[in-house]
Amino acid sequence: MASWKRDATSGLIVLVPVIVTLYVIAFIYNNIATLPFVESIEPAWIRVPLTLLIFALLVFAIGYLMRTATGPLVEGAIDDVMNSLPGLRVVYNASKMAVETAVTGTGDLQAPVKLETWDGMRMTAFKTGKRTGDGRDVLFLPTAPNITTGFVVEVEPDEYTEIDERVEDALTRVLSAGFGETSEDIGVPIDVAEESAKTDD
Protein backbone atom coordinates (compact mmCIF):
# COMPACT_ATOMS: atom_id res chain seq x y z
CA MET A 1 0.00 0.00 0.00
CA ALA A 2 2.67 2.49 1.02
CA SER A 3 4.82 1.50 -1.96
CA TRP A 4 2.26 2.30 -4.65
CA LYS A 5 1.32 5.57 -2.95
CA ARG A 6 4.97 6.57 -2.89
CA ASP A 7 5.40 5.62 -6.57
CA ALA A 8 2.26 7.55 -7.55
CA THR A 9 3.42 10.62 -5.64
CA SER A 10 6.87 10.48 -7.20
CA GLY A 11 5.33 10.15 -10.66
CA LEU A 12 3.06 13.13 -10.11
CA ILE A 13 5.97 15.24 -8.85
CA VAL A 14 7.80 14.57 -12.13
CA LEU A 15 4.87 14.81 -14.58
CA VAL A 16 2.63 17.56 -13.18
CA PRO A 17 5.21 20.38 -13.25
CA VAL A 18 6.15 19.44 -16.84
CA ILE A 19 2.51 19.31 -17.96
CA VAL A 20 1.65 22.58 -16.22
CA THR A 21 4.71 24.33 -17.69
CA LEU A 22 3.90 23.14 -21.21
CA TYR A 23 0.24 24.12 -20.78
CA VAL A 24 1.13 27.64 -19.65
CA ILE A 25 3.54 28.09 -22.58
CA ALA A 26 0.90 26.83 -25.02
CA PHE A 27 -1.75 29.08 -23.44
CA ILE A 28 0.42 32.20 -23.76
CA TYR A 29 1.46 31.29 -27.32
CA ASN A 30 -2.14 30.74 -28.47
CA ASN A 31 -3.28 34.02 -26.94
CA ILE A 32 -0.51 35.92 -28.72
CA ALA A 33 -1.17 34.10 -32.01
CA THR A 34 -4.88 35.05 -31.90
CA LEU A 35 -4.28 38.77 -31.41
CA PRO A 36 -6.09 40.71 -34.18
CA PHE A 37 -2.97 42.38 -35.60
CA VAL A 38 -1.14 39.02 -35.67
CA GLU A 39 -3.99 37.15 -37.38
CA SER A 40 -4.27 39.87 -40.03
CA ILE A 41 -0.69 39.41 -41.24
CA GLU A 42 -0.20 37.66 -44.55
CA PRO A 43 1.30 35.31 -45.59
CA ALA A 44 0.30 33.05 -42.72
CA TRP A 45 3.77 31.55 -42.17
CA ILE A 46 5.04 34.91 -40.91
CA ARG A 47 2.70 34.67 -37.92
CA VAL A 48 4.72 31.88 -36.30
CA PRO A 49 8.08 33.73 -36.03
CA LEU A 50 6.21 36.94 -35.15
CA THR A 51 4.40 35.17 -32.32
CA LEU A 52 7.68 33.73 -31.06
CA LEU A 53 9.29 37.18 -31.26
CA ILE A 54 6.47 38.76 -29.23
CA PHE A 55 6.72 35.91 -26.71
CA ALA A 56 10.48 36.47 -26.35
CA LEU A 57 9.96 40.23 -25.91
CA LEU A 58 7.35 39.50 -23.24
CA VAL A 59 9.80 37.24 -21.39
CA PHE A 60 12.54 39.87 -21.50
CA ALA A 61 10.10 42.61 -20.42
CA ILE A 62 9.03 40.60 -17.38
CA GLY A 63 12.66 39.74 -16.66
CA TYR A 64 13.54 43.43 -16.72
CA LEU A 65 10.60 44.15 -14.40
CA MET A 66 11.98 41.61 -11.92
CA ARG A 67 15.22 43.62 -11.72
CA THR A 68 13.38 46.76 -10.68
CA ALA A 69 12.12 47.63 -7.20
CA THR A 70 8.59 46.62 -8.24
CA GLY A 71 9.59 43.15 -9.46
CA PRO A 72 10.21 41.43 -6.11
CA LEU A 73 6.95 42.89 -4.76
CA VAL A 74 4.98 41.48 -7.70
CA GLU A 75 6.71 38.10 -7.44
CA GLY A 76 6.12 38.02 -3.69
CA ALA A 77 2.43 38.80 -4.15
CA ILE A 78 2.07 36.02 -6.72
CA ASP A 79 3.92 33.57 -4.44
CA ASP A 80 1.65 34.49 -1.51
CA VAL A 81 -1.51 33.94 -3.57
CA MET A 82 -0.37 30.62 -5.04
CA ASN A 83 0.93 29.31 -1.71
CA SER A 84 -2.43 30.04 -0.08
CA LEU A 85 -4.15 27.55 -2.44
CA PRO A 86 -4.05 23.98 -1.07
CA GLY A 87 -2.76 21.48 -3.61
CA LEU A 88 -1.96 24.07 -6.28
CA ARG A 89 0.89 25.48 -4.22
CA VAL A 90 2.81 22.22 -4.60
CA VAL A 91 2.31 22.28 -8.38
CA TYR A 92 3.25 25.97 -8.55
CA ASN A 93 6.45 25.54 -6.54
CA ALA A 94 7.37 22.37 -8.41
CA SER A 95 6.95 24.15 -11.74
CA LYS A 96 8.92 27.14 -10.50
CA MET A 97 11.74 24.94 -9.25
CA ALA A 98 11.78 22.98 -12.53
CA VAL A 99 12.18 26.17 -14.56
CA GLU A 100 14.79 27.64 -12.22
CA THR A 101 16.75 24.39 -12.25
CA ALA A 102 16.56 24.11 -16.05
CA VAL A 103 17.65 27.72 -16.60
CA THR A 104 20.14 28.35 -13.80
CA GLY A 105 20.89 24.84 -12.55
CA THR A 106 21.59 24.01 -8.91
CA GLY A 107 25.17 25.30 -8.91
CA ASP A 108 24.37 27.94 -6.30
CA LEU A 109 23.52 25.21 -3.82
CA GLN A 110 26.34 22.93 -2.80
CA ALA A 111 26.05 19.55 -1.04
CA PRO A 112 22.93 18.92 1.07
CA VAL A 113 23.51 18.41 4.79
CA LYS A 114 21.58 17.45 7.90
CA LEU A 115 21.30 20.14 10.54
CA GLU A 116 20.02 19.46 14.06
CA THR A 117 17.92 22.55 14.77
CA TRP A 118 16.43 21.28 18.04
CA ASP A 119 17.30 18.39 20.31
CA GLY A 120 16.80 15.18 18.35
CA MET A 121 15.24 16.87 15.27
CA ARG A 122 17.17 17.14 12.00
CA MET A 123 16.35 19.30 8.97
CA THR A 124 17.70 19.32 5.42
CA ALA A 125 19.92 22.30 4.57
CA PHE A 126 22.32 23.15 1.77
CA LYS A 127 25.87 24.47 1.79
CA THR A 128 26.25 27.76 -0.05
CA GLY A 129 30.02 27.64 -0.30
CA LYS A 130 30.26 30.82 1.76
CA ARG A 131 31.95 31.26 5.13
CA THR A 132 31.78 34.00 7.74
CA GLY A 133 34.78 35.89 9.04
CA ASP A 134 34.84 33.81 12.24
CA GLY A 135 34.95 30.49 10.35
CA ARG A 136 31.27 29.48 10.36
CA ASP A 137 29.72 27.91 7.25
CA VAL A 138 26.70 29.65 5.71
CA LEU A 139 23.82 27.23 5.03
CA PHE A 140 20.45 27.71 3.37
CA LEU A 141 17.57 26.03 5.23
CA PRO A 142 14.54 25.93 2.88
CA THR A 143 10.92 25.68 3.97
CA ALA A 144 8.51 23.05 2.64
CA PRO A 145 6.85 22.98 0.20
CA ASN A 146 7.89 26.50 -0.85
CA ILE A 147 11.64 26.12 -1.29
CA THR A 148 12.04 29.69 -2.55
CA THR A 149 11.82 30.86 1.06
CA GLY A 150 13.81 29.75 4.08
CA PHE A 151 16.54 30.76 6.49
CA VAL A 152 20.21 31.61 6.08
CA VAL A 153 22.04 30.15 9.06
CA GLU A 154 25.66 30.35 10.15
CA VAL A 155 26.94 27.23 11.91
CA GLU A 156 30.23 25.68 12.93
CA PRO A 157 31.50 22.98 10.51
CA ASP A 158 31.08 20.27 13.16
CA GLU A 159 27.45 21.20 13.86
CA TYR A 160 26.04 19.64 10.69
CA THR A 161 26.43 16.30 8.92
CA GLU A 162 27.24 15.95 5.23
CA ILE A 163 25.13 13.30 3.49
CA ASP A 164 25.55 11.14 0.39
CA GLU A 165 22.71 12.64 -1.65
CA ARG A 166 22.28 14.75 -4.77
CA VAL A 167 21.02 18.33 -4.50
CA GLU A 168 18.08 17.51 -6.79
CA ASP A 169 16.97 14.57 -4.60
CA ALA A 170 17.14 16.64 -1.43
CA LEU A 171 15.19 19.49 -3.06
CA THR A 172 12.52 17.04 -4.24
CA ARG A 173 12.07 15.73 -0.70
CA VAL A 174 11.66 19.23 0.73
CA LEU A 175 9.42 20.36 -2.14
CA SER A 176 7.08 17.38 -1.75
CA ALA A 177 6.97 17.80 2.04
CA GLY A 178 8.61 14.39 2.38
CA PHE A 179 6.11 12.49 0.21
CA GLY A 180 8.39 12.34 -2.82
CA GLU A 181 11.12 10.34 -1.11
CA THR A 182 11.82 7.05 -2.88
CA SER A 183 14.78 5.83 -0.85
CA GLU A 184 14.48 4.03 2.45
CA ASP A 185 17.70 5.70 3.57
CA ILE A 186 16.95 9.41 3.62
CA GLY A 187 20.19 11.33 3.61
CA VAL A 188 22.76 8.73 4.67
CA PRO A 189 25.83 10.36 6.26
CA ILE A 190 28.83 10.25 3.91
CA ASP A 191 31.01 8.23 6.26
CA VAL A 192 28.24 5.64 6.71
CA ALA A 193 27.66 5.45 2.95
CA GLU A 194 31.35 4.93 2.26
CA GLU A 195 31.56 2.21 4.91
CA SER A 196 28.50 0.49 3.40
CA ALA A 197 30.06 0.62 -0.08
CA LYS A 198 33.25 -1.01 1.23
CA THR A 199 31.17 -3.76 2.85
CA ASP A 200 29.29 -4.42 -0.42
CA ASP A 201 32.58 -4.73 -2.29
Image: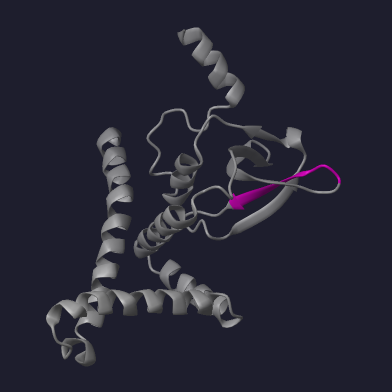
**Residues in magenta, as a range:** 134-141
On the rendered image, what quadrant is the N terminus found in? top left
**Which of 36 and 20 lies nearest the eye of the viewer?**
36
Q: Residue at x 31, y 45 (%)?
A: 9
Q: How many marks?
A: 0
Q: Is residue 14 above or below residue 19?
A: above
Pick the front one: 152 or 67: 67
Residue at the left extreme, as displayed? 43
Q: Judge from the rendering whether residue 193 lies leftward or rightward of residue 26; answer left or right.
A: right
Q: Is residue 115 above or below residue 13?
A: above
- Is 27 magenta? The answer is no
Q: Is residue 150 left or right of residue 86?
A: right
Task: Kindly identify the residue that appears in the image at 45 percent across and 57 percent down.
Answer: 103
Q: How is the image coloured?
A: one colour
Instruction: Identify the main secondary structure in magenta.
Output: strand
Query: Where is residue 172 drawn, in percent x and y?
Result: 43, 46
Q: Residue 195, located in which quarter of the rendered image?
A: top right
Residue 46 to residue 166: above or below: below
Q: What x and y, as percent, mark residue 12?
A: 28, 49
Q: Residue 87: x, y in percent?
A: 34, 61
Relative depth, front residue between 22 and 160: 22
- The residue depicted at 32 percent of the width and 57 percent of the height is 17
Residue 107 drawn above or below residue 192: below
